[in-house]
Image (cartoon, rainbow, N blue to C red):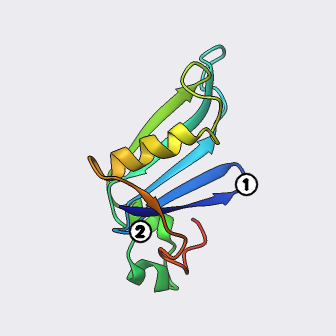
């Protein structure tokens, strides 16, 4: 499965060639002492070229119509939102059992959400 990673501020967006999308971001603790430093939001809905060309609606609201799954990461799990294993985790969730290859040409008009 081909994919690319888009980095914006404190967020990394992982998008696969079939439109799978996950957002990895820096996160503040939910409760004092919980150790949360990052989170991944995995979207069930796939991004399409039609979504990207829709001037009336943003991609977030369109993929947000489907199911959303969230995983919180602590300092015991990773070094932060930029930890490469969080990209690997997102890819494995988006496309179980595939091998992965970076391809910056995937959804070239997609600049982030």
Q: Which residue in the protein does label 1 denote?
A: 9
Residue 31 is marked as none
Q: In this view, does 92 lie to the left or right of 104?
A: left
Q: Which residue in the protein does label 2 denote?
A: 62
Q: In which quarter of the image is the C terminus?
A: bottom right
Residue 77 rendering spot, x and y as whole percentages: 54, 24
Q: With respect to residue 47, does 10 lie above or below?
A: above
Q: Which residue is at the front of the view, 58 or 46?
A: 46
Q: Residue furthest top?
A: 33
Residue 16 rendering spot, x and y as whole percentages: 41, 63
Residue at 51% from the left image edge and 46% from the top image edge: 87
Determine whether the residue tagged by mark 1 lies in a helix, strand or loop.
loop
Q: How far apart are marks 1 and 2 (CA)?
A: 22 Å
Can residue 54 be seen in the rendering of this structure?
Answer: no
Of the residues under marks 1 and 2, which one precedes in the sequence?
1
Q: With respect to residue 81, does 48 lie above or below?
A: below
10 Å neighbourhood of mark 2: few (<14), some, or many (≥20)? some
Residue at 57% from the left image edge and 18% from the top image edge: 76
The quarter of the displayed image where residue 30 is located: top right
Q: Residue furthest right?
A: 9
Front: mark 1 or 2? 1
Q: Quadrant of the N terminus?
A: bottom left
Residue 99 rendering spot, x and y as whole percentages: 34, 53
Q: With respect to residue 21, does 73 lie above or below?
A: above
Q: Which residue is at the front of the view, 75 or 70?
A: 75
The quarter of the displayed image where residue 110 is located: bottom right
Can residue 67 be seen in the rendering of this structure?
Answer: yes
Determine whether the residue tagged by mark 2 lies in a helix, strand or loop.
helix
């Amino acid at each position: 499965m081909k994919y690319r990673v888009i980095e914006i501020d404190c967020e990394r967006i992982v998008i696969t060639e079939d439109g799978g999308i996950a957002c990895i971001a820096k996160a503040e603790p939910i409760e004092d002492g919980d150790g949360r430093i990052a989170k991944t939001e995995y979207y069930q809905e796939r991004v399409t070229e039609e979504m990207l060309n829709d001037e009336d609606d943003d991609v977030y609201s369109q993929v947000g119509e489907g199911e959303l799954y969230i995983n919180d990461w602590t300092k015991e799990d990773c070094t932060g939102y930029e930890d490469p294993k969080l990209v690997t985790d997102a890819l494995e969730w988006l496309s179980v059992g595939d091998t992965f290859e970076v391809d910056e040409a995937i959804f070239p008009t997609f600049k982030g959400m």
